[in-house]
Image (cartoon, helix red, strand yellow):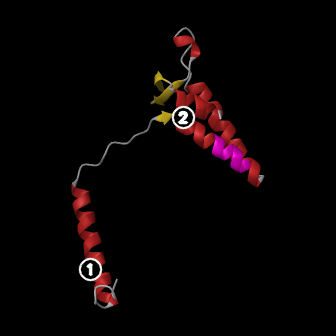
Amino acid sequence: MAERFNKDRTEIERILVEGRDALMDRRMRRARPGRDDKIIAGWNGLMISSLALGGAALQEQRYVRAAERAADFVLSALPVPKGQADGRLMRYCRRGRAVELGFLDDYACVIR
C-alpha cells in the first residue's frame, strides 16, 4: 500500500490505526444486533454429516462421537410431539421450543 499510494510504511500504518479506531468508536455507539440462537434442523444435518464423514476419513473417533451426540440432540429436540402432525421433523427450535414444520431441505440434510 505504501508503494501504491506513494507514502512510507509508518504513514500507512498510522492511517490504518486511525481508521480502525474511528470505526470501532462508531461501532460501539450503535445498538448491538440481536443474537440468533435458533437450532436449525437442516444446518445441523449438514454439520453432522461433515463431522461423520470427516471422522471416518481422518479416523478421528471424537468427530464421529460429536456427530452422534448432535444427531441425538436433533432427533430428540426437533420432532413434533406425537399427536401433533404425526411426529414430523420441525425446522428449528429456540429456547427449548420447536417451531415450524420442517421443509424438504431440513429432511434431506438430517437424513444425510
Residue type pointed to by label 1: Ile
Residue 70 tag number: none
Q: Position of residue 72 (x, y in %)?
A: 65, 31
Residue 32 lies in the magenta stretch:
no
Does the image show residue 77? Answer: yes
Instruction: Tally the marks.
Output: 2
In the image, taking residue 110 as reference, residue 8 lies left or right, namely left
Quadrant where the image shows the C terminus: top right
**Residue 16 in picture, x, y percent from top left:** 30, 77
* Magenta part of the chain: 49-55
Residue 60 seen in the current view: no
Query: For mark 2, does the 10 Å Cα neighbourhood hold few (<14), some (14 to 19), or many (20 or more) residues?
Result: many
Q: Residue, x 60% and y 25% (percent of image)?
A: 76
85 displayed left or right of 112: left
Secondary structure of residue under mark 2: helix
**According to the image, label 1 marks what residue?**
15
